Image (cartoon, grey):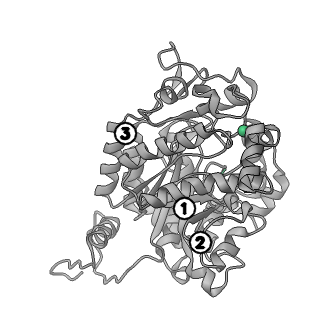
């Protein structure tokens, strides 16, 4: 940039786009500073994750989020389309998924999930709460994202977190009855047929190289008593239910591979010890560090560390400083393992987030902190500078209706942490060790 003009050069059109984004961030009412910037990202994968199952968000909200991602050069949108809160994408081969599994009796998660009469209701029930994306809407989202150099990565969960599927097709779970909180019945050939057919339609809609197939938090207790699941274990020579999950996930991985796609799985899928190296593991909660071992041995890992990156928890548990502080080259990685850190992703789960205002309070500025970890070399990162730069942009954000958390909320003192956590966890289904969390937030 000189007094005479602006020169922008890049190796590809994404680079030019990011250059323009930087220019926009530099522009103020006083003009654009005269600077030279030579820049490139640390990681090719810089993502956020949005759960649209626990609360459904309309297309316009997704567009706003994509705009904000682009502003900070995030390039992967992990779209969590299926979970216990409701099924969110039209699938022609299984129309009941959206007819019977996308709406529920109650908008409030705690009422519905923990205390209430946990039922999904048909789409046309008066007062039904929920929604889903038509295929046309999905195509619009994918196109809108592509214009901003963002790849939309859909997630369809296997084998757990699928109560909404069984509400519509109970024959797919071990008991054959809805609302029994199990996983897909892996011994039932219909489950494999479902997986293939749903993924086929998903692949028609999403051109992304990566498809997320879940794999987290599956207790698998029902598999122990299910004759079909036990028969499958014998047939395939599998030693335990963990291996049965591994086998099931491998079927999806192979299906995707045949279609030229790469699977992403949550870190629990590594428990079976059966995952091939050419998939990508997303680390969120991995006390045994299997994902680190996976990366050290040549597999790719996305870092989404629970205690640092989960934006659905209050700032009193995960302060901005804490989010900003995480070096994606996490402990235990060898030099080889560091090369296999594929990137970073900041998840937001929406059990207790039902509208864009709450979403923007929780995500901004934490999403941007993770975006910076994805782009900027660690030695050039500085939290105070980040805070100042974010504040400088606040008026522009507020002008377009985005309401980031006020600066006074970003890094609460221990007393305030305690009161925030008490309030938050009183209103949720989990009761964790709050003292430990406060300690962690200030460690
Ligand atoms: C997860 O938060 N269950 C991936
Ligand atoms: Zn079964």
- What is the crowding at mark 3: few (fewer than 14 residues within 10 Å), some, or many (at least 20)? few
Counting residues from the N terminus, which is met first, the one under dot 3 or under dot 1?
A: 3
- Mark 1 lies on residue: 345
Would you say 77 lies left or right of 25 here? Answer: right
420 to 225, vertically: above or below = below
Residue 396 image-quadrant placement: bottom left
Q: Is mark 1 within 8 Å of ligand 1?
A: no
- Mark 2 lies on residue: 277
Please give the name of the residue rendered at 74% of the width and 69% of the height, measured from the top-left corner: 289
Please give the name of the residue rendered at 30% of the width and 65% of the height, measured from the top-left corner: 24
98 to 20, vertically: above or below = above
Counting residues from the N terminus, which is met first, the one under dot 2 or under dot 1?
A: 2
User: Can residue 353 be seen from the camera position used here?
Assistant: yes
Closer to the camera, 214 or 419? 214
Counting residues from the N terminus, which is met first, the one under dot 2 or under dot 3?
A: 3
- What is the crowding at mark 2: few (fewer than 14 residues within 10 Å), some, or many (at least 20)? few
Helix, strand or loop under label 2:
loop
- Mark 3 lies on residue: 60
């Amino acid at each position: 940039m000189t007094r005479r003009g602006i020169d922008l050069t890049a190796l590809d059109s994404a680079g030019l786009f990011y250059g323009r984004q930087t220019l926009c961030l530099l522009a103020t009412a006083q003009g654009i500073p005269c600077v030279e910037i030579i820049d490139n990202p640390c990681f090719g994968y810089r993502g956020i994750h949005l759960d649209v199952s626990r609360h459904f968000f309309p297309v316009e909200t997704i567009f706003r989020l994509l705009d904000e991602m682009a502003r900070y050069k995030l390039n992967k949108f992990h779209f969590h389309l299926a979970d216990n809160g409701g099924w969110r994408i039209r699938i022609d081969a299984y129309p009941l998924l959206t007819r019977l599994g996308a709406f529920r009796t109650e908008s409030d998660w705690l009422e519905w999930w923990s205390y209430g009469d946990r039922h999904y209701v048909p789409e046309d029930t008066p007062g039904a709460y929920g929604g889903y994306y038509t295929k046309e809407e999905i195509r619009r989202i994918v196109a809108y994202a592509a214009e901003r150099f963002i790849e939309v990565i859909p997630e369809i969960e296997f084998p757990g977190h699928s109560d909404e599927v069984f509400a519509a097709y109970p024959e797919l779970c071990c008991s054959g009855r809805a609302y029994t909180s199990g996983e897909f019945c892996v011994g039932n050939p219909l489950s494999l047929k479902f997986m293939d057919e749903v993924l086929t339609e998903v692949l028609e809609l999403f051109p992304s190289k990566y498809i997320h197939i879940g794999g987290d938090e599956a207790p698998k207790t029902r598999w122990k008593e299910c004759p079909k699941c036990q028969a499958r274990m014998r047939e395939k020579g599998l030693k335990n239910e963990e291996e049965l999950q591994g086998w099931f996930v491998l079927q999806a991985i192979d299906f995707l591979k045949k279609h030229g796609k790469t699977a992403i799985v949550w870190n629990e899928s590594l428990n079976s010890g059966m995952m091939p190296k050419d998939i990508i593991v997303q680390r969120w909660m991995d006390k045994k560090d299997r994902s680190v071992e996976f990366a050290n041995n040549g597999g790719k890992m996305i870092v989404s560390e629970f205690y640092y990156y989960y934006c659905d928890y209050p700032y009193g548990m995960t302060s901005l400083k804490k989010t900003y502080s995480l070096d994606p080259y996490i402990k235990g990685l060898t030099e080889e393992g560091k090369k296999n850190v594929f990137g970073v992703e900041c998840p937001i789960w929406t059990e207790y987030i039902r509208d864009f205002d709450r979403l923007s309070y929780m995500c901004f500025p934490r999403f941007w902190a993770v975006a910076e970890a994805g782009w900027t070399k660690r030695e050039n990162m500085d939290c105070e500078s980040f805070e100042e730069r974010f504040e400088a942009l606040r008026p522009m954000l507020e002008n377009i209706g985005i309401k980031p958390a006020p600066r006074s909320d970003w890094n609460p003192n221990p007393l305030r942490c305690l009161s925030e956590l008490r309030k938050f966890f009183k209103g949720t289904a989990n009761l964790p060790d709050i003292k430990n969390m406060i300690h962690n937030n200030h460690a």
